[in-house]
Image (cartoon, helix red, strand yellow):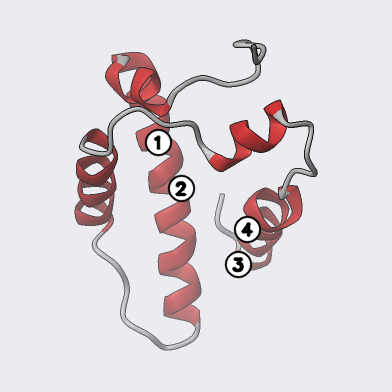
Amino acid sequence: NPNPSLGTDVTLVVQNPKLRALVTKVMHEVVDLCEEDLKQSGQEGLNREEIVKQMFELTDNMGSYLSSTVLDLRAKARLELEYMFMKPLARAHELGVP
């Protein structure tokens, strides 16, 4: 049996009001970064609230699942830290997005 302390089902996260609020905040930060990246390359921005709403609608209707990061962690596989976390963080710093 996998260690439950190594991540949890996404459904449990989005059904918990405090965790859902935290996820919403993170999603806003990601979309803000995307918007700034688009703006600096001369492209049209995004509708932050609509994107977050759509992502939650998809997630709320997907049923029970584990994120790929949790699956990798439980399998003791190499985590995609560079592309999932480090590169977006570096880009945010480059663009001055807090």
Distance in Å between CA atoms under marks 1 and 3 = 19 Å
- Vertical relation: 49 (above or below) 60: below
Q: Which mark is residue 29?
A: 2
Identify the secondary structure beneath mark 3. Answer: helix
Q: Examine the image and state in which quarter residue 68 appears.
A: top right
Please tell me how crowded label 1 is: few (under 14), some (14-19), or many (20+) other residues with Cα within 10 Å.
few
Residue topped by disc 3: 95
Q: Dot 3: within a 10 Å radius of its alpha carbon, few (fewer than 14), some, or many (20 or more) residues?
A: few
Label 1 vs label 3, nearer the camera: 1
Residue on which the image places disc 4: 88
Decide if residue 76 is on the left or right side of residue 60.
right
In space, the residues marked 2 and 3 are separated at their CA atoms by: 13 Å
- What residue is shown with label 1? 25
Q: Does residue 55 appear left or right of residue 19 in this picture?
A: left
- Helix, strand or loop for disc 1: helix
Three-letter code, disc 3: Leu
Q: Are marks 2 and 4 in contact (CB under 8 Å)?
A: no
Q: Is residue 4 left or right of residue 81?
A: left
Compared to residue 17, the image places residue 52 above or below, namely below
Instruction: Point out residue 73 in the picture as x, y percentages from the top left corner.
Output: 71, 31
Q: Against 14, is 41 above or below?
A: below
Image position, residue 34 (x, y; %): 45, 65
